[in-house]
């Protein structure tokens, strides 16, 4: 796990660097806001530990800037400021937690571990996209090239499965068990019929075909494939 610590106070910085390294993390220490900001924007970390009061670019601006750039790295603010306003401001800007100095190292470590655990849960996004096909998951809607496509519940589930596992050949048996909750022994013709219907809606009117048959194996969804 890679951590970036941004702290301008020499002693605190050294202490954090040493303590977190001994706890088994790979720690990069930045002693200025500018360095910290640059590192947070250009390298990949699992967590940022940011001091708020930095003489050049403060911790708030770092968080604001990385969130605006779409980076979701969890952030723990570390600061001597402890007014409610500051706390709220930090959290509103997209910090994940807040620890007021002076703090016990054990508490910092516990919070770091909690944040890392929380962020390792995959983020569920509301949309999936392949080329010009967009799936709106909460609403069970599909669009291609800006056109709404009417799908039945099963058709949507089938398409979602194909999109989630794009590039992978999905055997009929797997599709049957995932979408219809039935075994391979059941009527697999159902799958072929459903795929044909889905293709008619997703692919027929479009030049670029997304759903492909892999003979003797199953189906897959992929952009630019020669199998068909
Ligand atoms: Ca400081």
Image (spheres, rainbow, N blue to C red):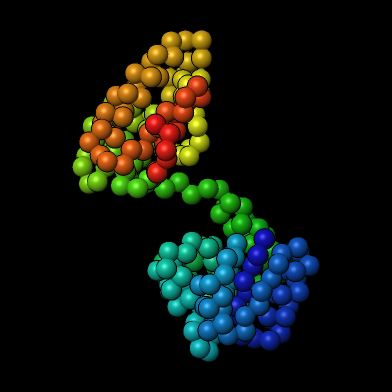
- Total tally of numbered discs in the picture: 0
Q: Position of residue 8 (x, y in %)?
A: 61, 85
Instruction: Please identify the residue farthest to the right as the structure is shown.
Output: 22
Q: Is residue 178 visible?
A: no
Q: Position of residue 182 (x, y in %)?
A: 48, 15
Q: Position of residue 160 (x, y in %)?
A: 40, 35
Q: Nearer the viewer, residue 184 or 207?
A: 207
Please tell me whether residue 57 is drawn above or below residue 5 in the rendered image: below
Please tell me whether residue 54 is drawn above or below residue 119 in the rendered image: below
The residue drawn where x is 43% and y is 72% is 64
Q: Is residue 137 visible?
A: yes
Instruction: Please identify the residue farthest to the bottom as the structure is shown.
Output: 55
Quadrant occupied by the N terminus: bottom right
The residue drawn where x is 29% and y is 35% is 203
Quadrant occupied by the C terminus: top left
Which image quarter: residue 159?
top left
Quick check: 25 left or right of 30?
right
Please tell me whether residue 16 is drawn above or below residue 11 in the rendered image: above
Instruction: Please identify the residue farthest to the front as the structure is shown.
Output: 226
């Amino acid at each position: 796990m890679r951590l970036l610590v941004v702290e301008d106070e020499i002693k605190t910085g050294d202490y954090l660097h040493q303590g977190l390294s001994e706890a088994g993390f790979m720690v990069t220490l930045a002693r200025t806001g500018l360095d910290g900001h640059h590192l947070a924007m250009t390298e990949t970390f699992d967590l940022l530990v940011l001091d708020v009061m930095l003489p050049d670019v403060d911790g708030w601006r770092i968080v604001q800037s990385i969130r605006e750039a779409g980076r979701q790295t969890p952030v723990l603010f570390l600061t001597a400021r402890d007014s409610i306003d500051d706390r709220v401001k930090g959290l509103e800007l997209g910090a994940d937690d807040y620890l007021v100095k002076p703090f016990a190292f054990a508490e910092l470590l516990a919070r770091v571990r909690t944040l890392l655990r929380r962020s390792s849960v995959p983020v569920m996004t509301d949309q999936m996209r392949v080329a010009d096909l967009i799936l709106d998951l909460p609403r069970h809607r599909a669009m291609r090239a800006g056109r709404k496509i009417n799908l039945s519940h099963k058709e949507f589930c089938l398409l979602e499965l194909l999109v989630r596992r794009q590039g992978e050949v999905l055997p009929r048996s797997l599709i049957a068990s995932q979408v219809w909750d039935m075994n391979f022994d059941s009527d697999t013709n159902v799958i072929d019929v459903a795929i044909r219907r889905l293709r008619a809606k997703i692919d027929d009117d479009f030049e670029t075909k997304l759903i492909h048959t892999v003979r003797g194996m199953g189906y897959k969804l992929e952009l630019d494939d020669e199998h068909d």
